[in-house]
Image (spheres, rainbow, N blue to C red):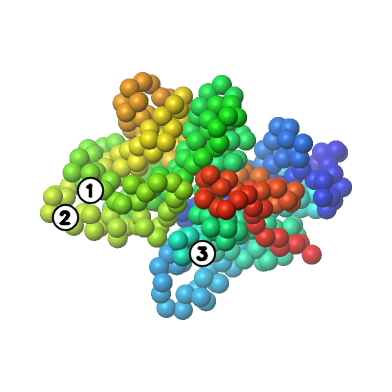
Amino acid sequence: MSADLDPPRSASSSLYIGLMSGTSLDGVDGVLASLPADGSAMATLATAYVPFPDDLRAALMALQASGENELQREAMAANQLVVYYAQCVAELLEKSAIPAAYIRAVGVHGQTIRHRPELGYTRQTNNPSLLAELCGIDVIADFRSRDVAAGGQGAPLVPAFHQAVFGNEEQARVAVNIGGISNISILPAGTQEATSGFDTGPGNVLMDAWIARHQGRSYDADGAWGASGKPDAALLAALRNEAYFALPPPKSTGRDLFHIEWLDAQLAAPAHVHLSPADVQATLTAFTAGTIADAILRHAPQTGAVYVCGGGAYNAYLLRLLEETLSAGAGRAIPVLSTETLGIAPNHVEALAFAWLAQRFCLRLPGNLPAVTGARGLRVLGGLYPAQ
């Protein structure tokens, strides 16, 4: 343990933990980071990943739609979920050899099961009180609700963090997070223009559901199955006809719209029933790449480079299609790179973002960007669940 750590329970501690479990429902990513309040360089001190068991995955998936006894089912799933969150925290502390008493707070997103900002709510399953009890660390949670209460979408919340860590004075950039859903952060060069961003549509959610149905695998490793097929132009056009893509930002989406039943409805058309499963997977990959590219070309045409994080950053076929589609649409080369090239592994970015949002809460600084979410103004996001 470092000798220069702040005293236990010190409000000046720069050590935060961030936990993120996304719409892919695969598990929880965690980071323990040093985030100095003076704005000096952050440092990742430990990382951990804890996969979810099949029964928890199934319970969380079932909660995406209304059903019998869902209040109790959600409460029980939240309690089970938090056990894995606590395991991730324990692994981070063990790897870093830093006691819990030196951590200022844990920032935890929870598991989104409903996202309906147009109805005035978003629901992230979680039991932060139980997590505080199990870990003995202050927990900051429920980051999205305050933005929704202020008239915003509650998502995406990462563009402010992306600007802080990936922005560049000389080059206009776009950071793309490809989880279950994809979102972009538009990062202009310098400080003359505001950071903006929004959910572009599906990321891995449909590809993961399709490969699970046909091959029993949770994801298409490196995009190999998708690359073995051929995108179908007619199906691709039908998928891209979804009204969401024509909506202006601010906007956000999730499994409430893009799910396997939505895909099945598209595939039921006579023009598409002949397609092989591999061709459908190839089309879904092209769908994700194309809708991200469209959003960038329409809203960030001056982009010099695109940096990708989230699980989609490990899909080589998807990144190749994204770079080809972007460059063809722009009439110039636009490189598509992993955030690894900027020093942060793609699967750690969102967890770091929630550690950063926890710090913002502790410092009583706003965590949202109204230009991104549409909220009426800047807001301090989250709620505190103290360790004692």
* Residue 285 visible to the viewer: no
Q: Please state the horizontal and vertical placement of residue 371, each as a whole percent of the image.
A: 53, 44
Residue that appears at 44% across and 46% down: 249
Residue that appears at 52% across and 76% down: 72
Is 36 located above or below residue 82 in the figure?
above
Residue that appears at 22% across and 38% down: 230
Q: Which residue is mark 1?
A: 238
Q: How many marks?
A: 3
Labels 1 & 2 near each other (Cβ < 8 A) = yes
Please indicate whether residue 151 sits to the left or right of residue 97 in the image. Answer: left
Q: Nearer the viewer, mark 3 or mark 1?
A: 3
Dot 3 falls on a residue whose secondary structure is: strand
Q: Which residue is mark 3?
A: 121
Quarter of the figure with residue 298 = top left
Q: Residue furthest bottom?
A: 69
Q: Nearer the viewer, residue 233 or 249?
A: 249
Q: Please state the horizontal and vertical placement of residue 68, each as a whole percent of the image.
A: 42, 78
Q: Which residue is mark 2?
A: 269
Dot 1 falls on a residue whose secondary structure is: helix
* Residue 42 visible to the viewer: yes
- Tell me the quarter of the image containing the C terminus: bottom right
Q: Amino acid at mark 3?
A: Tyr
Quarter of the figure with residue 189 = top right
Q: Residues within 10 Å of mark 3 (few under 14, many from 20)?
A: some
- Tell me the quarter of the image containing the N terminus: top right
Q: Amino acid at mark 1?
A: Ala
User: Disc 3 to disc 1, how far (Cα)?
Assistant: 30 Å
Q: Which of disc 2 and disc 3 is earlier in sequence? A: 3
User: Disc 3 to disc 2, how far (Cα)?
Assistant: 34 Å
Q: Please state the horizontal and vertical placement of residue 177, each as a whole percent of the image.
A: 48, 41
Q: Nearer the viewer, mark 1 or mark 2?
A: 1
